[in-house]
Image (cartoon, rainbow, N blue to C red):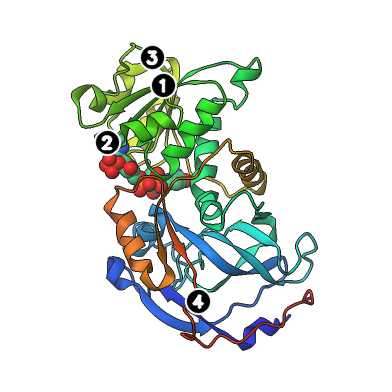
Amino acid sequence: MASPASSGTMRAVQFDRYGGGAEGLKHVEVPIPTPKKGEVLIKMEAASVNPIDWKIQKGMVRPFLPRKFPSIPGNDLAGEVAALGGGVSDFKVGDKVIAINFPSGGGFAEYAVAQASLTVARPPEVSSAEGACLPLAAVTALQSLRAAGVGLDARGGGDPKNVLVTAASGGVGHFAVQLASQAGHRVTATCGARNLGFVGGLGADEVLDYGTPDGAALRSPSGRRYDAVVHCAPPFPWSVFRPVLADGGVVVDITPGAAAVLTALRQKVTFSKKRLTPLVFSPSKDDMELLVDMARRGMLKPMVDSSYPLSRASEGWAMSMAGHATGKVVVETRQPHGARSTQPLDVATPQE
Ligand SMILES: NC(=O)c1ccc[n+]([C@@H]2O[C@H](COP(=O)([O-])OP(=O)(O)OC[C@H]3O[C@@H](n4cnc5c(N)ncnc54)[C@H](OP(=O)(O)O)[C@@H]3O)[C@@H](O)[C@H]2O)c1
């Protein structure tokens, strides 16, 4: 199939080798991608930065990712449908959408393609910047809570648990706190001193400064033992978790290194009651719909740490790499007047 969109070019930001950090991002003019069967072409409004983006650039997941160079990063997409690939009938040109395009990325550009099966409608109550915050980070938060046995229904007769969220001020953590707290669980959270108020405002009823001895030891001020931990902070040894877990307590580690994987294996073969579970998020349209609907109803509030136009994407990249964002870093695609040459798209007809 062919899309009329392929006749134009677009501004994009890409890297063409491993390493280089923010300075390794290059501004380029490249062809607008053509949506294939089952895909939508999105005229980008906002993308968000996730640590996996710069970890891919660093070569931390080689040889698997990126699949090829040059690579346009940005897995979380928000924008407007500009063209439809073959067989896509649940969207039309002009629809506002949010999509996840992991691991292919492509969001640091004026146009990006995404699977229609991983694209959801963006309601007007959720801005494009907020929408771009949701896919990878909020889905990871939701799936981590599920993996730790934390239901979203503790208020409606479910089972309220003692939940700990580490790095609760970060992209994943700030969603995990809100989801657990909204669901009626008792939430303890760790963050830096400057974010104690922010994290308390998300719904955590105990907030620990990770720079203090109690915070570093994850010690609850009220003596709680945790049934579930969503561990978003850099790796801790198992010896830090073991004393603060309840019997049957589960730590879901979203950045599991080799030591965590070995711990999990050892616990499995020894039938340990306290367990560590490594988690890799799985892109899910159902989960995105649930989370976007929560955001629409004001039950989930994406926090935008900072937002950069595409022309300054490298600043957002550096911000994320520094590891001190409060919430999410966003890259917004704006078109400076008279600054570029993308041709108008003629894209109304679904393509086969
Ligand atoms: N497994 C998966 O599928 C998956 C999915 C998403 C993310 N991840 C990984 O999960 C990690 C977190 O992702 P993210 O997007 O939430 O990162 P992020 O937004 O960059 O996290 C930054 C936050 O972490 C806080 N922080 C750093 N060290 C901390 C510590 N020791 N204790 C408490 N807070 C600490 C920082 O607070 P200060 O500024 O105060 O230091 C900052 O607010 C990353 O390594 C990412 O690659 C994995």
Label 3 CA crowd tier, 10 Å (few <14, some 14–19, many 20+): many
Label 2 CA crowd tier, 10 Å (few <14, some 14–19, many 20+): some
Point out residue 177 in the picture as x, y percentages from the top left corner: 46, 32
What is the three-letter code of the residue carrying label 1?
Answer: Asp
Whether residues under marks 2 and 4 lie with C-beta atoms below 8 angstroms apart, the answer is no
What is the three-letter code of the residue carrying label 2?
Answer: Gly
In the picture, the disc for residue 243 is none
Rendered residue at 52%/43% (across/down): 138
Q: Indicate if the residue with disc 2 has its beta carbon within 8 Å of ligand 1.
A: yes
In terms of sequence position, does the residue under pointer 2 or pointer 1 come before the other? 2
The picture quadrant for ligand 1 comes to top left
Q: Which residue is mark 1?
A: 205
Work out how far the residue at label 4 is from the one at label 3, CA to CA, in angstroms. 52 Å
Whether residues under marks 2 and 3 lie with C-beta atoms below 8 angstroms apart, the answer is no
Q: Secondary structure at mark 1?
A: loop
Closer to us: mark 4 or mark 3? 4
In terms of sequence position, does the residue under pointer 4 or pointer 3 come before the other? 3
Point out residue 309 in the picture as x, y percentages from the top left corner: 42, 68
Q: Which residue is mark 4?
A: 335
Closer to us: mark 2 or mark 4? 4
Q: Secondary structure at mark 4?
A: loop
Quadrant including the C terminus? bottom right
Point out residue 43 in the picture as x, y percentages from the top left corner: 60, 71
What is the three-letter code of the residue carrying label 4?
Answer: Gln
Q: Secondary structure at mark 2?
A: loop
Residue 286 lies in quadrant: top right
